[in-house]
Image: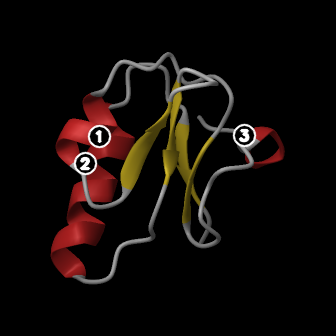
Amino acid sequence: MADRDRKVEQNSPGRFYVDDTCIDCDLCRETAPASFARDDRGRRSYVQAQPRDELEQAACLAALEECPVEAIGQDG
C-alpha cells in the first residue's frame, strides 16, 4: 500500500498520488496516460493531473490496482 508520507513532490495535489517506492515500470502511464507522467530525473512516475471525469478516474483506479509495488495511493 502506498504511503502518503512518502509521496513524491511532483504529484499534482488531489486524491491520487505516487510514493517513492515506484520502480518506473510504465504500467500506470500506459493505463492512465492523462494522469500519470514520468520524472526522468527521479526515474519514476507521478500524478501529473488528477482525473477530470469518470473515465479518467476509472483508469487511475485500474493503475492503482495493477501497480506491482503498490506505489499508487488515494486519499478519500
Callout 3–callout 1 Cβ contact below 8 Å: no
Q: Residue at x 50, y 54 (%)?
A: 47
Q: Quote the CA–CA distance across marks 2 and 3.
A: 18 Å
Q: Secondary structure at mark 2?
A: helix
| Above or below 30: residue 53 | below
In this view, the residue farthest toward the bottom is: 53
Q: Amino acid at mark 1?
A: Arg
Q: Residues within 10 Å of mark 1 (few under 14, many from 20)?
A: many
Q: Quote the CA–CA distance across marks 2 and 1.
A: 11 Å
Q: Residues within 10 Å of mark 3 (few under 14, many from 20)?
A: some
Labels 3, 1: front one: 1
Q: Which mark is residue 29?
A: 1
Q: Residues within 10 Å of mark 2 (few under 14, many from 20)?
A: some
Q: Read off the residue under disc 2.
A: 62
Label 3 vs 1, first from the N-terminus: 3
- Is 21 in front, or is 35? 35
Q: Secondary structure at mark 1?
A: helix
Question: Is the N terminus in the top left, top right, bottom left or bottom right quadrant?
Answer: top right
Q: Read off the residue under disc 3.
A: 3
Question: Is the C terminus in the top left, top right, bottom left or bottom right quadrant?
Answer: bottom right
Label 2 vs 3, first from the N-terminus: 3
Label 2 vs 1, first from the N-terminus: 1
Q: Residue at x 29, y 40 (%)?
A: 29
